[in-house]
């Protein structure tokens, strides 16, 4: 059986309790319990992104029915509209959107990359030009804390100096690393609701493992309720991605939650859980649904493809979501091209898939069968055995050896049927 470690609970602050419930005996995967102001949840967990107070296409009631315990909101966008002053006046974002469970807000730092052409970064903070009306907004560590305190999320992220993971300038990466550490102290000083909201620090340092290690050590001196690995999933080589995640996860404390920001591909989640990460977020499951792509254990399914126009099977016979229990692939194929209902149904399924993936990983970690789960998952997703090399290397690092590919001569006859049955086509 998987072993549990540490004390019954670690009181990481007045607003968060953390407990390790089970650990994989081979990898660094673990199951943890987080007690937050609005609910209690278990990790590993994926957080759907509700950038502007909504996960696109789904209501809060539908998210609850899909067993989503925690969603993400974006401080920058909420500050522009409806404004955090209004949210505070109306009782916070939870009350405003009717969400009863836990919430995490990003600091606005990611927009330094996504809106780089509209941003000017200085030691004071970052000045954004609104992409909608051209107005200027200065986001400082103090302002980010004020905005997030007004929003009222259970977990709030420190403002960090974010640079693209593909930037060629080592000097800029080091500058961002050092500035992030200076800004975390300003965030801590400005955080006015520590008894009700948890401030997480963000590890920076680009792809430089030495800088990443320094960032981890310095942030740990602040003894924050939790820590995130930031600045990844920006187009960097996957071989470098996993090495940064592994390096950081090994150093971050066992009695705190570890969050890898911007990661949402199912394969990435499975690998990062094996490396010791607890929490994830990404727009991918909902965004790819709007392009007609459903997530399954066999890979991605492009439901706009003509092969599905007469297919009466559900997207996934094992999925309990309404899209799978009530509708066929043929029906959703009809809707996926033009009707918003199609995107809604696929979004529902994709969020359900990510929740079930987390649940299955937790169950297998508890049963100490997680390594076999990983092997089976990869064999099903990559039925030809064409595993990405970065996955092979990352999993080898924690003791999981993926099986050798089956010789082509034994699979050639069945590949066509498998492809038709699985509809495995990338978006």
Image (spheres, grey):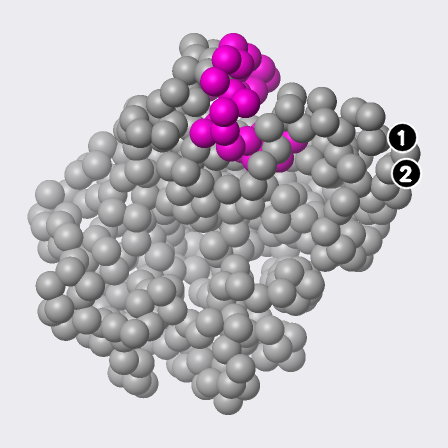
Image spot of residue 325 (x, y percent): 47, 12
Q: Looking at this view, name the residue that lies furthest to the bottom.
A: 171
**Residue 108 located left or right of residue 307:** left
Q: Residues within 10 Å of mark 1 (few under 14, many from 20)?
A: few
Residue 362 is at least partly visible in this image:
no
Estimate the x, y position of residue 322 in percent, counting from the top left: 42, 16
How crowded pointer 2 is (Cα within 10 Å; few <14, some 14-19, many 20+) is rated as few
Q: Residue at x 56, y 41 (%)?
A: 426
- Asked if marks 1 and 2 touch (Cβ < 8 Å), the reply is yes
Residue at image location 75% in from the left, 42% down from the top: 24
Per the rendered image, the range of residues in magenta is 294-323
Q: Nearer the viewer, residue 221 or 175?
A: 175
299 shown above or below 76: above
In the figure, residue 289 lies in which quadrant? top left
Q: Is residue 174 left or right of residue 159?
A: right
The one of 1 and 239 positioned closer to us in this rendering: 239
Label 2 SS: loop
Residue 132, picture quadrant: bottom left
Q: Is residue 61 above or below residue 399?
A: above
Q: Is residue 75 visible in the rendered structure shown here?
A: yes
Residue position for label 1 = 410
Majority SS type along the magenta span: loop
Query: Is label 1 in a helix, a strand or a loop?
Result: helix
Mark 1–mark 2 distance (CA, rounded to whole Å): 6 Å
Residue 61 is situated, as x and y percent measured from the top left of the image, at 30, 24
Depth check: give the residue in front, 256 or 182.
182
Is residue 312 highlighted in magenta? yes
In the shown orientation, is residue 340 left or right of residue 409? left
Q: Which mark is residue 407?
A: 2
Q: Where's residue 69, x and y in %?
A: 42, 34
């Amino acid at each position: 059986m998987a072993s549990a470690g540490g004390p019954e609970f670690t009181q990481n602050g007045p607003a968060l309790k953390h407990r390790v419930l089970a650990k994989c005996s081979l990898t660094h995967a673990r199951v943890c319990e987080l007690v937050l102001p609005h609910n209690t949840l278990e990790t590993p967990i994926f957080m759907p992104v509700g950038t502007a107070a909504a996960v696109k296409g789904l209501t809060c009631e539908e998210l609850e029915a899909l067993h989503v315990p925690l969603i993400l909101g974006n401080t920058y966008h909420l500050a522009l509209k409806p404004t955090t002053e209004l949210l505070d006046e109306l009782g916070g974002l939870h009350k405003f959107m009717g969400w009863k469970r836990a919430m995490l807000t990003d600091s606005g730092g990611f927009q330094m990359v996504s809106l780089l052409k509209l941003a000017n970064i200085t030691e004071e903070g970052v000045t954004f030009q609104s992409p909608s009306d051209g107005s200027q907004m200065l986001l400082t560590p103090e302002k980010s804390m004020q905005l997030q305190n007004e929003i009222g999320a259970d977990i709030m992220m420190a403002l960090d100096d974010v640079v693209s993971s593909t930037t060629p300038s080592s000097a800029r990466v080091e500058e961002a690393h050092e500035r992030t550490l200076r800004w975390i102290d300003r965030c801590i000083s400005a955080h006015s609701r520590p008894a009700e909201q948890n401030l997480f620090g963000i590890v920076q340092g680009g792809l430089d493992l030495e800088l990443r290690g320094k960032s981890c050590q310095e942030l740990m001196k602040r003894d924050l309720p939790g820590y995130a690995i930031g600045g990844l999933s920006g187009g960097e080589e996957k071989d470098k991605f996993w090495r940064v995640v592994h390096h950081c996860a090994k150093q971050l404390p066992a009695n705190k939650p570890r969050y890898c920001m911007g990661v949402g591909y199912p394969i990435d989640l499975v690998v990062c859980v094996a490396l010791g990460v607890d929490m994830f977020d990404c727009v991918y499951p909902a965004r790819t649904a709007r392009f007609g792509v459903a997530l399954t254990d066999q890979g991605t399914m492009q439901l706009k493809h003509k092969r599905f126009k007469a297919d009466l099977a559900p997207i996934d016979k094992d999925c309990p979501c309404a899209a799978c229990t009530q509708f066929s692939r043929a029906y959703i194929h009809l809707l996926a091209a033009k009707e918003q209902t199609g995107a809604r149904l696929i979004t529902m399924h994709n969020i359900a898939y990510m929740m079930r993936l987390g649940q299955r990983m937790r169950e297998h970690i508890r049963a100490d069968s997680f390594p076999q789960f990983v092997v089976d998952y990869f064999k099903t997703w990559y039925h030809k055995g064409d595993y990405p090399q970065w996955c092979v290397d990352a999993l080898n690092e924690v003791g999981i050896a993926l099986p050798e590919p089956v010789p082509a001569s034994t699979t050639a006859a069945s590949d066509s049927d498998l492809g038709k049955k699985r509809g495995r086509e990338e978006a």
